[in-house]
Amino acid sequence: MTLIVQKYGGTSVANIERIKNVAARAIATHRAGNRVVVAVSAMAGETDRLVALVEGITHTYSRREYDVVVSAGEQVSIGLLAIAIEAQGCKAKSYLGWQVRFMTDSSFSKARIQEVEGEKIHRDLQAGYIVVVAGFQGIDNEGSVTTLGRGGSDTSAVALAAALKADRCDIYTDVDGVYTTDPRIEPKARKLDQISYDEMLEMASLGAKVLQTRSVELAKKYSVPVRVLSSLEEGTGTLLTEENATMEQVLVSGITYSKNEAKITVVGVPDRPGVAAAVFGALSGANINVDMIIQNVSASGETDLTFTVPKSDFRQALGVLEGSIGKIGAREIRGNSEIAKISAIGVGMRSHSGVAQKMFDALSRESINIQMISTSEIKISVVLDEKYTELAVRTLHDAFDLGKESGDHITR
Ligand code: ADP
Ligand code: ASP
Ligand code: MG
């Protein structure tokens, strides 16, 4: 018997009608002769509401207690879905993360799954139940509730599929697949029939929120066949697969944007060994991840260090650096949180040059100033003023002809 894990996001369970629709879909899959496990998110807007309640008290809350609060939304949606499935004539049982042992580390609000015990679920499936599991949450080895970071239900679903050795993991959302860029920004975006794990990993980590990055990492690691599809219409969606020959022909396969970073410049530090270590040591001591880094040495022998940090850590990062300005020997710390990172991604870049040039040309034609640049084997990212985000995404989508079936192919 085929075992299928289905995941439904917030918009798919946004109200009672939608929950009934999800129940009908799970039942149809079950009645077609499959074993079905469903992972669900909280109803749309619910997690945001819970976060706002916490932040209404203080910005310096305990991460442990934050997880206790924000994990609550999923408890409601799993119960409602199980009730809806039973109301439509099928057996269903819901479980919270800790009940089916989603063991995680103790990094509250961004915990990583270490292990999922599948036994109880297998027993229920054997007995003919549709099993409904709360996404986004787990438990650490102290018994504290943890959450997996925003968008974490995708990761719960893929982890479940890997642990249960499922034949498929279908992620149902409010778009009918993975597109060349966010279809809400660029209506000309084109749905991809398939995408390699590596490209999806880059797209997710560079801002395409259709899948949480960690879910793609797990899918790749355990070779879980993942499909992204719409819960509101029929279709074949987008399949995540290993890279294949046709993919390498495409130079750029997607454009992403992220408004989740902020830029910091440490101005006027002496140009001598140990300075970068002092700056980044202070930040890593505060558990703050640094992304793009640029170092400029001026003629006077002074250095400016510019880098990006997650927006959620921006205030804390400024505080840490202000606190160690004397030790670093810097003149000034400057920050700017109104930036966006726009990236072009494609496995074809491995073997072909010219992508960066095309990107810079296209942006300059729109008079968009580039503040920072970073590249890796299969992506190029630029940082620019946040107000140009939409324009830059559309400009690059056009420049690489992503709206067309043929795309911007490599000529051999
Ligand atoms: P869910 O609640 O189902 O988890 P999300 O809101 O987390 O849904 O993710 C789906 C959204 O991701 C879409 O509505 C779309 O706006 C956005 N998105 C961003 N980039 C892409 C992309 N390249 N392809 C498809 N959707 C994208
Ligand atoms: N409900 C959680 C969130 O809003 C998890 C998810 O939707 O994947 O982030
Ligand atoms: Mg999501």
Image (spheres, grey):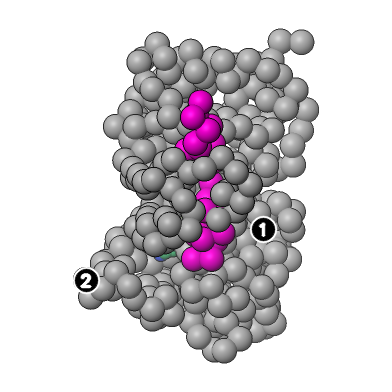
Q: Is residue 30 left or right of residue 371?
A: right
> In the image, is residue 405 above or below residue 132?
above
Q: Is residue 104 magenta?
A: no
**Whole-number angstrom distance, CA of label 1 to CA of label 2:** 35 Å
Q: Horizontal and vertical percent for residue 149?
A: 47, 63
Q: Quadrant of the C terminus?
A: top right
Residue bearing mark 2: 56
Q: Nearer the viewer, residue 210 or 392?
A: 392
Residue 111 occupies quadrant: bottom right
Q: Residues within 10 Å of mark 1 (few under 14, many from 20)?
A: some
Q: Residues within 10 Å of mark 2 (few under 14, many from 20)?
A: few
> Which comes sooner in the sequence, label 1 or label 2?
2
Name, please, the residue furthest toward the bottom: 142
The amino acid type of the residue labelled 2 equals: Gly
Label 2 SS: loop
Q: Quadrant of the N terminus?
A: bottom right
Count of marks placed on residues = 2
Q: Horizontal and vertical percent for residue 327?
A: 48, 58
Magenta extent: 279-307
Residue 256 shows up from this direction: no
Q: Is residue 167 left or right of residue 324?
A: right
> In the image, is residue 23 above or below residue 300?
below
Q: Is residue 293 magenta?
A: yes
Residue bearing mark 1: 218
The amino acid type of the residue labelled 1 equals: Leu
Q: Residue at x 48, y 44 (%)?
A: 269
Residue 155 shows up from this direction: yes
Q: Nearer the viewer, residue 217 or 308?
A: 308
Residue 46 occupies quadrant: bottom left
